[in-house]
Amino acid sequence: MSSNIGEKNESLGMFAGFVLLSEDHWDKQQFLDDLHEEWEIDLEEDDDTNPNVVVANYEDNRVVIAKFSSTIPNNEAEKNASNNYMWENAVEVTKTHKAHLFVSVLGETADLIEKGKRYVKLLAACCKQREAIGVYTCGVVFEPKIYETFAAIMRDGYLPIFNWIWFGLYKSAEGVTAYTYGMDVFGKPEMEVVDAQGTPSDIRGFLANIVEYVIENDVTLRHGETIEFSENDSHKIAYSEGVSLPGQMTLKIT
């Protein structure tokens, strides 16, 4: 195993993202009501006099939500919206945003999964705002209704993998290549499946199953090991320069 896998990760536990707004307005009380109705969460603000800011304790974390009367700088949201192959009009819709909410869950915690769930619940509640037109997180812009749908699986006890991690997909020279974006928040390297044979949905599902296993069980995959699903279904692991994510090291799953 390369020593780089264990190096300090500055992104560990950094749950922060944005909700894009069609107008410079949001209804803070509606957000608080939606958070209670959808997730049975009641936030007690430090100071409830500012209509554009929420600062509160949430279990052992701090929540900060703030409205900014501006677009995301440097066309960053538009560039990342182009990554979303599931939303045909992602870039066009993202270009229309006039303001945005910054959403973050702060504080050290031993349970990254619970912290991540709290983050997703906050963003999902923000999606119910009339002005919400996109959720910019984990390197992509989601359609709000889709983000809410992904988040809803938590009610059935499942992890919101597709809210935390973006699964990039594209046709490559010899098949389908898939990659993750967002694993660093959980202290894990990104993963890739390169030139795989199968449908894009099958390849994404295969990679998502591995991601869920790694996050849920806090597993460290090592260079040279294999993942075995059955006696006749094993996959080698290599740690090397990224193919889809050049400039960083990734885990390749055969």
Image (cartoon, rainbow, N blue to C red):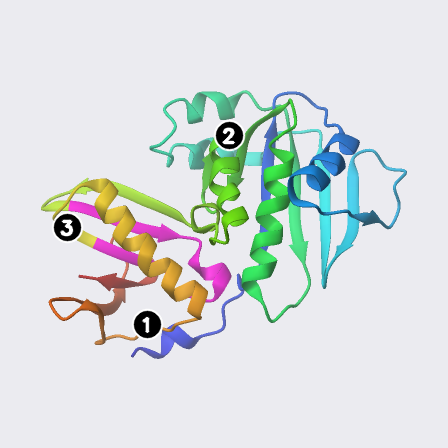
Q: CA distance from mark 2 to mark 1?
A: 34 Å
* Residue 148 higher or lower than 43, as above or below: above
Q: Residue at x 50, y 54 (%)?
A: 157
| Label annotation for residue 12 | none
Label 1 element class: loop
Q: Between tags 3 and 2, which lies in front?
A: 2
Q: Position of residue 102 (x, y in %)?
A: 66, 41
Residue 195 is tagged as 3
The residue at which mark 1 appears reads as 221
**Mark 2: which amino acid?**
Lys
Kind of element beneath mark 2: helix
Q: Amino acid at mark 1?
A: Leu
Residue nearest the observer in this picture, 101 or 72: 101
Q: Is residue 31 left or right of residue 131?
A: right
In this rendering, the answer to whether 167 lies above or below 101 is below
Residue on which the image places disc 2: 145
